[in-house]
Each structure stands twice: as structure tokens, then as C-alpha cells.
Amino acid sequence: MAGNPQGLPAIVLHGGPGSGCRDGHYDLFDLTRFRVVLMDQRGAGRSTPSAAVDIAALELNTTDHLLSDIEALRTHLGVDKWLVFGGSWGSALGLLYAQAYGAHVTALVLAGVATTARWDLAWLYEDIGNMFPEAHDAFCAFAPEAADVWARIGAYGAALRDPARAQAAADAWCTWELAIFDADFDSAGGNWADPAFRVGFARLCTHYFRNFCFREGNAIERDMHRIVDLPGVMIHSRFDPSCPLRSPWELAKMWPAARLEILGGTAHSALSDEISARIRAATDGFATG
């Protein structure tokens, strides 16, 4: 936690699932006006047990558990209402939290917006392979027996639970995650060069995605009526290869109190130069009213 103890409360929900928070997330806020909480989700970052070293981190680890954790943290800190920021998977988690606990949310700022609906997941792990066939063939080669994308995610998940295969599975999974951004473990920065991080990240991704994020159908779109009056900003790159623009575009149609800002380029990370400046402008805007 950092910032002004008397400032406007805000919470950061990281992506992945499994990427964890970074100090750079504080830069998305004016810390003279905000009191910012970074929450490492179960199994990720500094959360214990860590999915990188202990399969037990996947037990009692569902979307509902994470939503309860956010609410428990709010109560523990004595916060009545807070601004919720989420990037990528964190944007889906932020939307679900607001839909469930909207009375305690002042606004949403979301970047690299994802709904985690089946079509979103199919895009990331199958359909966009049409644009990156060599990388996708390598991704599929780790689980050649898988008949479709869902079986492939399941096969990766099983391998990641096997100590003898976990690192190889994690490396293959994460190689694909980065290939669509023309990056590798060394060039991507952050924690990608750490083999243990890759294991934890891949375990949490497959755990959530093989279970369709523990939600039936397109739950986020179905419940958008619950937040139609909640102020929000969605920031999304037109050519984001990870999360297609269609998702925030459709959400914007159902969310009149929100503004969708479409950037050029392919940036996805909230900490990229292209997106972070727009996030900071959005949070500044909510700080000044």
C-alpha cells in the first residue's frame, strides 16, 4: 500500500491470472491524491502458498474466492468505497467485483479489457494462431493428443501438476503467451525470465481457463445491467493480439456511464508507455471529480 493515507482509496487487480502486482502499478495513480492497494491474488506474487512451488495454491482458488478476498481486504482496511483498476484478467475480475459489490465501488478503470468468455479464450489459445502459425504449431505440439483448444488447455494443466513435466509445460505455455507480442523470456522484461514465475503463471492460467474462470457462459455481459450507472473508463489497443477489441466494444454498448478509449498499436500491458499514460489520465480525472 502506498500514497496519501487520507487520499481516495483505490485497488489494483493484476492480470494473468498469476502475473502478480509490480511497483510500477503505483505509477498509474497520483499518490498525493490516492491511497493505493496492490493485491496479489491467491497463488500469485507474494501470496502464499505460491503456485510456483506448491500445487496446494490451486485449491480453494476460484473467482468467487478472489472476489471474497477483495471484499475482505476492503473491510479490513476500513474502506467504504474505492476506485477499482484492473488490467487484462484483472479487468474481468474488476467487472465481476463491481457487479457483485457495486455499492463499494466509486469507479472502474480497465485496460486490455477481457471478459474471459469462451470466445475470448478460444481467440487467445486457438484463433489468433492463424496469424502466428509457427508459434501456435509449437504451442500445440506440447499436447499433440488434444483434439481442440479446451482439451489442449486441460492437457497443459495436467502437465503443470506433474513435477517432472511442469517446467517444460510452463515454458511452452509462456513462449506462446509472449510470441503473439513478438517477445521472448529475455526481451519481455518483468518476471518472465524467472523459470519459477513461469510455472506459477502457467499453473494459474490453466487452472482458471480449463474451468472457464468458474463462470457459466458470458457472465460479465449478462450482468452488465448491474453497473450501468457506475462511472468507468476502458482503455484498449485496436490491435491488441491477446484481447480483441470486440469485447470492450460490446461492453461499451451496455455501459452508458463508461467511456471506451481506443488506442492504435498492439500494446496490452497496463505498464506499457502507450497505455499507462492513458490510465494515469483516467485516474487523475476521477481524483479531481
Image (cartoon, rainbow, N blue to C red):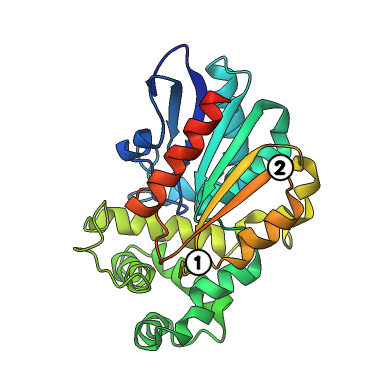
**Which residue lies at the image location 57% right of the left edge and 68% below the top edge?**
121
Q: CA distance from mark 2 to mark 1?
A: 21 Å
Q: Position of residue 42 (x, y in %)?
A: 47, 41
Q: Is residue 273 visible?
A: yes
Q: Which residue is mark 2?
A: 257
Within 10 Å of the Cα at label 2, are there few (<14), some (14-19), or many (20+) other Cα atoms? Answer: some
Within 10 Å of the Cα at label 1, are there few (<14), some (14-19), or many (20+) other Cα atoms? Answer: some
Q: Which residue is mark 1?
A: 238
Taking 147 as reference, is 264 left or right? left
The three-letter code of the residue at mark 2 reads Ala
Q: Position of residue 83 (x, y in %)?
A: 56, 31
Taking 282 as reference, is 26 left or right? left
Query: Relative to 22, is 154 above or below?
Result: below
Going by the picture, which residue comes out furthest to the left?
186
Q: Where, quadrant-wise, is the C terminus in this rendering?
A: top right
Q: Are marks 2 and 1 in contact (CB under 8 Å)?
A: no
Taking 115 as reference, is 49 left or right? left
Query: Relative to 42, is 160 above or below?
Result: below
Q: Position of residue 56 (x, y in %)?
A: 45, 47
The three-letter code of the residue at mark 1 reads Arg
Going by the picture, which residue comes out furthest to the top?
6
In what element is the residue under mark 1? loop
In what element is the residue under mark 2? loop
Q: Is residue 270 visible?
A: no
Q: Where, quadrant-wise, is the N terminus in this rendering?
A: top left
Number of on-image labels: 2
**Which residue lies at the image location 65% right of the left edge and 61% below the top edge?**
249
**Which residue lies at the image location 44% right of the left edge and 20% below the top edge?**
33
